[in-house]
Image: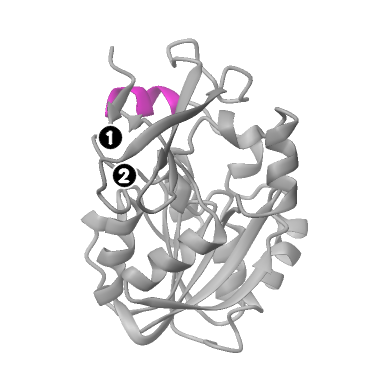
Amino acid sequence: MDARVLYKACPLCGSDHIDKTIVGDCSRHPLYKSEVPPEMQWMDCRQCQHQFTDGYFTDDMLSIVFRSVNENQKVGYNIERQRHVSSRMIEKIIPFKSSGVWLDIGFGNGSLLFTAEEYGFEGIGIDLRPENVEAMKRLGLQAHCDLVQNISFKKKISVVSMMDVLEHMPYPKEVLEFLHPAMEEDAYLLLSMPNSENILWRLMTHQNKNPYYGELEHYHNFGRSRLYSLLGECGYEAVRYGVSERYRVCMEVVAKKR
């Protein structure tokens, strides 16, 4: 069984000037399955300086990976503590947008959507793990188990959140471009992901202790600079940078639709 669909060019800029760089090992990942090849070959784009894996999982391989879920990604996980974490994220949006439809892509444990509703937003969730989607529906929230590109929204979206999700998408630029016309004119993005442009990332890499090179479900490593330029290419403008408290070495960015 082929594990990955190989990229023929950089998934962000389309350049074929790409080089093999670091080889990661995902065999120690908590969701690792023996059917998954343990080596992860990372590539660097000479044109736009983006770093990505040499390919993304086939549908068959993805179904194997999705057979299980991390405990902290299950709907309702540690719900009271996560409410406080989510509230601090939402309060970064409130100065810019305080009501409307909040779309959370890759909602995981659901805390951000639960808390957004508490703040007065209308929540819609998307996740690719069927058990999470069914759990959200049982709790009365609108949820979809599909790629966002396959969904037609009845209302314009006010806020789109992708918390540690963009790096999981084979073609992030396509998703950002798809979302743009589905959003209100004064809508906002809230994004979090690992930031490869800081001293901690460099130290962990130098010491051969960087966990993200073996992060099973990741296809991309973004630096702040490349993320900002990608947002600009897709019709958004970053208006706030912060440090995310969700995972190690992560950034949290608010961007406005232009």
Q: Quadrant of residue 202?
A: top right
In front here: 2 or 81?
Answer: 2
For the C terminus, the quadrant is bottom left
**Which residue matches tag 2?**
10
State the image coordinates of residue 208 (x, y, percent, origin top left): 70, 27
Disc 2 is placed on an element classified as: loop
Instruction: Give the main secondary structure, helix, strand or loop, of the magenta stretch.
Output: helix
State the image coordinates of residue 50 (x, y, percent, origin top left): 43, 49
Asked whether, in this view, residue 62 is left or right of residue 202, the answer is: left
Asked whether, in this view, residue 106 is left or right of residue 29, the answer is: left
- Residue 161 visible here: no
Q: Quadrant of residue 156?
A: bottom left
* Three-letter code, disc 2: Cys
Asked whether, in this view, residue 74 is left or right of residue 99, the answer is: right
In front here: 113 or 49?
Answer: 49
Report crowding for label 2: few under 14, some 14 to 19, many 20 or more residues within 10 A (C-alpha): many
* Magenta-colored span: 59-65
Question: Where residue 159 is drawn, which disc sits there?
Answer: none
Disc 1 is placed on an element classified as: loop
- Identity of the residue drawn at 62% across and 25% down: 30
- Identity of the residue drawn at 74% across and 51% down: 199
**Which residue matches tag 1?**
7
For the N terminus, the quadrant is top left
In front here: 242 or 59?
Answer: 242
* Three-letter code, disc 1: Tyr
Q: Is residue 74 above or below residue 96?
A: above
237 inside magenta stretch:
no
State the image coordinates of residue 196 (x, y, percent, origin top left): 60, 49
